[in-house]
Amino acid sequence: MKNQNNTRPTGRSRFKKRSAIVFSMAAAAATLVAGPADAQLARKPSYYQQQNQPQPEGPAAQLVPRPAVPSSLPALRSQADFDQLARVYDAGTPMQLAHVLFVVDRQAKPPRMYYIDTPRYQLHVRFLRDTRLAPNTVKREIDRNYLVPDRRFLFGTLSWQQNIGSFTYEFWEGDKLTAPLLRQAEQQVRSSFFGPVKFKTNSTLHERVAKEAGIDFVSQEALIREQPFLPMNLGTATGRVRIVEDDAGIDALLPDDIAVLRQVPIGLPPVAAVLTERPSTALSHVNLLAKGWGIPNAYVRDAAAVLKEHAGQWVALKVASSGYQVRRLTPEEIAALPPRAVRTAATGVVPGSARAIRPDLRESRLLPLASLRARNSAQCGVKAANLGAMQAAHIPGTSVPDGFCIPFAHYDRFMRANGLADRIARMQQQPGFASDPKVRQKALAQLRDEIVQWPVDAATAAGWRAAWQSQLGGGGVFVRSSSNSEDLPGFSGAGLYTTVPNVKTGDALEVAVKKVWASVFNPEAWEARAAAGFGAESVLMGVFVQTAIDSANAGVMITRDPFDAGHPHITYISAKRGIGIRVVEGRRVAEQVMYSSWSKAIQVLSRSAEDTALQLDKDGGVKEVPVEAGRNVLTDDLVVRLSNVGAAVKRTFNGVDQDIEWATMGDRIVLLQARPYVERRR
């Protein structure tokens, strides 16, 4: 059995009982990107995070007996010195972290180093007060030691980074370090520590300071790349292990499969769990689907090789914050497994908690963006309605590209005229449709092709062209889905439906609308809706025709930490250069950062290494163009601006956290979509 267990040392205090993955913004970063190594990194309980947390009392405060240990040492001259002062979290797991807090007293002559008995003193400030080094210091004075150059103390952590086999020292991500302060810390640590040690950066500020000071460093991003395991969605599952070598194997997956993916696909049919051996992003289609289905999802380095012994076997899988467990089921356990509800997903009638918006088919007018508000979700879908609400909010420094909605009534009339209900019924009665994914996919593809070939009423098509010409100037447009079964609380539907980019002629507009309508029957949409409880007959497709923009950068952001609900002050941002179609595909890791409105720190989780980007083609559609490799997509200024815009969008939607698509054109942030953020399932 492969087992990264969830062992935690005895005596962990109450404020350490949060997710084993995230303790600070830096630790949150570690969990984010598939490929990280730094869930160890900043799990230190910083003063800023923990100062007002209750401390353990009574039995909860009692520790496993330890040999007598000094409150601090002026130097660590051996591994034994480090070990006796170290606190270890998540021992025996990929997230194991052995670390020692330290304080540099800059006021002492000469400056003095204190390596702290870290199991005894949970916080730097506790050490100062309990040892009488600064017994009566008030909070304001303690704060200075993080924020100003003329501080008395430097508060840091020295850790063993097991994934790179090296010691590092670091500071809280919000610490306003300066080059002189860092040089002094470097001198103090190196002269008092027995082995090689590197400075570890926890923010873009720290990286700039290290470069200014001429000090070699290891970035959080570099550590993240070395992480052998990353939980993307926690949970447990039972199923049969299926190792999928390429996209062709995706189509054969069944609802009871635990999919081990060599590549990160764009879409996925409902499965019991997902393990990937290539990094993806928090907002990749695969992870969003896993969240919507409530199934475990994790990155595991060399997953196919690690799980090869279980291929084709029934197992129990647990994905936890600090590791994963795989246990082979006994024949008795397999026989006792209850029928899985999603085995009947192909019928489209699985009961569930998700509910499509009840459509209002009385409205058949084409509704311009300026008229759309939340109430119009019943005619045009949440996507279009939310775009109207964001435009009406007049968020400074932002714009929403103009467009108009083709309401549900047009889809309903078209489908009724062509007998869609009868066609769906006949399709579902085909032999093998309910049980064989390949049969199902073939039948759905045939239906989509038929829909695109069916003629649109001449007057209806003429109305579309007239609105395109008069309102949007007959320029390039994106023809986008806005169904009644996406952008809902509990079901985002992200990536399920088709967007047709940069449509430039009237004839192409008519075809594009039908392609979006037909995408109701995309296989991934069919399977995901069925697993969530939507019947095929309840789904209607609105279409939003929107002016195309040739963006410099584009991406998505979440207005809270997607990995820990305890961090509402965090904004997660994922970005790539050019048009943002690829951001959520997950085939390549996007540039990812976290910004804290509390610490004002920006942490880089990954930088985009792509050397091409998508741009609008003058003849319609999009084209791939070369870009400068290695150039950062996100500047610090843009990160802060995006975070502020995200907070404004969240306020627009009554304080509900949002998953937002954005782009940049010149100095403006362009808002392309906002949907309620779907919480991760635990």
Image (cartoon, rainbow, N blue to C red):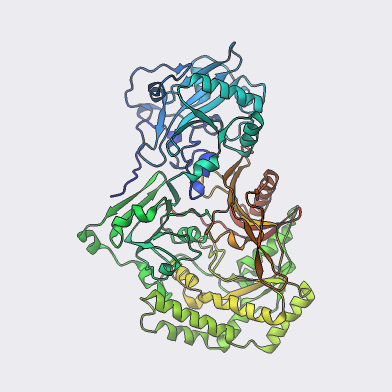
Give the image location of residue 670, x and y in percent.
71, 58
Q: Position of 406 compared to 270: left or right?
A: right
The residue located at (52%, 70%) in the rendering is 356
The quadrant holding residue 547 is bottom right
The picture places residue 275, in percent across and down from the top left corner, at 41, 56
Q: Which residue is drawn at the image coordinates 66% and 68% (left, top)?
A: 622
| Residue in the foreground of this view, choosing between 29 and 293 | 29
Q: Up-down: is 209 above or below 578?
A: above
* Percent coordinates x, y for residue 186 in the rendering: 57, 24
The picture quadrant where one finds residue 480 is bottom right
User: 660 or 158, which is in the foreground?
Assistant: 158
486, 284: nearer the viewer? 284
Residue closer to the observer: 485 or 28: 28
Residue ID at (28%, 64%): 338
Q: Along the horizontal axis of the image, is 443 left or right of 504?
A: left
Can I make out residue 254 in this image? yes
Looking at the image, the residue that sits furthest to the left is 332
Residue 566 rendering spot, x and y as whole percentages: 52, 43
In this rendering, position of residue 68 left or right of residue 581: left
Note whether 148 is above or below 14 in the view shown. above
